[in-house]
Each structure stands twice: as C-alpha cells, then as structure tokens.
Amino acid sequence: MTRARGVARVRLTHLGAAGWEITDGQRVILMDPYLSRLRYRARFGLLDTPELPGDTRRVFGPDDDLVSDTAAVDARITRADFILISHSHFNHTLDMPYIARKTAATVIGTESTTILARAGGVPEPQLLTVRGGEDYAFGALSIKVIPSLHSALNGKHYYDGRVVPRDFRGPRRMDNDVEGGTLAYLLRLAGYRILWFGSMNYLEREVQGLRPDVALIAAATLTAAPAAPQTATSRRTPVIGGSSRVRVPASCSSWPDVLSWSSRPRVCSTRWRTLPCSSR
C-alpha cells in the first residue's frame, strides 16, 4: 500500500491462539505471544487440549508448575520491542517473561500482567502498567489501550474478578491462574490503524467507530443477550465501523507462520492446520 508520504510496509504474522507479531521493519510488536501451547488436563471441565498423533509432550494438570517451552519460543521469536498483553491467563502470558528478558521488550498490560512479569524476572524499567483509556506515543508507533471483556465461557457462567496478588512470586499453576482484567489495543503504525482483540468479547462503547484498517478479531460463538447467538466477528464489524480493509478472525486455529498479511502486496494468505490451542 502506498501513501502520499511514501511507501509503507507492515507485516502481520499469526503466532497461534491469540498471538500476533506486527512489524514495519523498524520495530516488532508482539501480542499475547504463547508459543509453548502446553498440553493440559482438568481445566474448565471437559475443555482440555485435543490429542494429536505423535504429540508426546508432557501433560500438565491443575497442581503442576507451568513451564514455558523456551525451545519453541526461540524457534520463532528473535526480536521484540513491545509485548502487548490482553489479559493474564497462562495461555496469553506464560511465555511473556522469557521473551521480555530475552529481547528487553517493554511489556504493556494490566497490573496483574506486570506483576506476573516482575515475578518472572522482567526488570522494572521494561514494565508499563495500564488500565484502559491510555493513548501513548513511542516515536512512529502509537498505542491506544481499550477496556474490554473476557470471553463468555461455560455457557456465559464465566466470571473472574480476581487479580494477581502484588506479592506473587510464583510458581504459576492452573489453580492460581486469574484473568486480571481484559484489554484490547489499537496500534497506529506506518500510516495504518490496527485493532487487536486478545479475547472473544468487547465493550461496544469502547470500540464504537474506531474504523481500523486491519481488525484482528478473536473469533468464537458468543451470545449477545437478549439477541440470538452471533459470531464475534459479525457482532464487532458494524460497531468498529465496518470499513476495515482486512478483518481476520483468529483464535484456536493455527501455529506460527500459517497466517500472515503484508501491506504490499495487499493479500491475506492462510494455510489452516488444527493444533492444540487455547479457546480463551
């Protein structure tokens, strides 16, 4: 895509689950990078990691210490300048401390998220705590933080108002895993407005009329009471403006490098492949 002020190129790569990598060639932004994709059991009743032939990795239970698969992270992540986190559940944040220590990236998220980062050894100068409503400029990149909602799981019985205790030092387990509040983000980079949701719900008043060029929408079937069930994509599209040049529903669908979008040429290509994933 060409702008009057010159040629701008932005590349988006889906990292699997809610995770994305966005770069303009000068800076790299990661969102909810979760490359470990742990096999786990006994969480949310029957919501367990699906079995795949040949997958012999360890299975984690609710009382096990959750450990990042650093080899999986290293195979994909070599650089990051910013890490944006939607909420604090392990399948959005488990790899974040290791990536932040490795790359010296700035971590942006709720207080629960930055507490987890601190517990994971991320230096204080790399932590930026937000609550929604902030709009920060970092040179050619600006980030608007948007208050949001977590997915309506378990037949809409999901609710988690807990936050990570300020004195938390680990270890991380599924039985101490909390949401800690949910955020969405609007990035402005190289002349483009990119809206990202890391969970499958939203606050209509917060996204009304945003009109992004690209909308990365966590997709699942939700019920917008009192209306009939609709998909997250169909619900959000008219609210955010409906004019996005590229709208990508992405969650629980693919592994690194299977989906990417580049502003030149203007295409979105996919090679879908089902793998163990988060539905949250």
Image: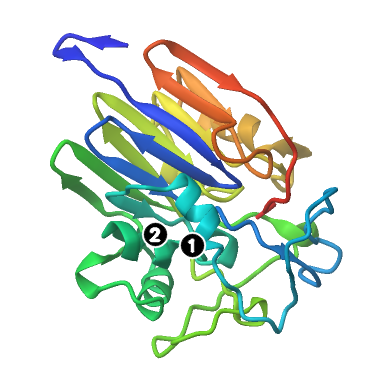
* Residue type at numbered disc 2: Ile
Residue 261 in the image: state x and y as whole percent: 47, 23
Above or below, 112 relative to 264: below
Quote the CA–CA distance across marks 1 and 2: 6 Å
**Residue at point 41%, 21% (across, down):** 262
In the displayed image of the protein, which residue is found farthest to the bottom? Answer: 167
User: Callout 1 environment at 10 Å: few (<14), some (14 to 19), or many (20+)?
Assistant: many
Residue 152 visible, this angle: yes
Residue 73 in the image: state x and y as whole percent: 49, 54
Q: Which residue is mark 2?
A: 99
**Residue 162 falls in which quadrant of the image?**
bottom right
Q: Which residue is mark 1?
A: 95
Q: How is the image coloured?
A: rainbow
Quarter containing the N terminus? top left
Above or below, 133 relative to 214: below
**Residue at point 37%, 13% (across, down):** 264
The one of 81 and 154 positioned closer to us in this rendering: 81
Q: How many marks?
A: 2
**Residue 228 falls in which quadrant of the image?**
top right
Report the disc number at residue 37: none
Q: Is residue 207 left or right of residue 61?
A: left
Residue 210 in the image: state x and y as whole percent: 38, 32
In contact (CB < 8 Å): disc 1 and disc 2:
yes
The one of 1 and 239 positioned closer to us in this rendering: 1
**Residue at point 39%, 86% (across, down):** 166
* Residue type at numbered disc 1: Asp
**Considering the numbered disc 1 on the image, is that residue within a helix, a strand or a loop?**
loop
**Considering the numbered disc 2 on the image, is that residue within a helix, a strand or a loop?**
helix
Residue 240 visible, this angle: no
Above or below, 175 relative to 203: below
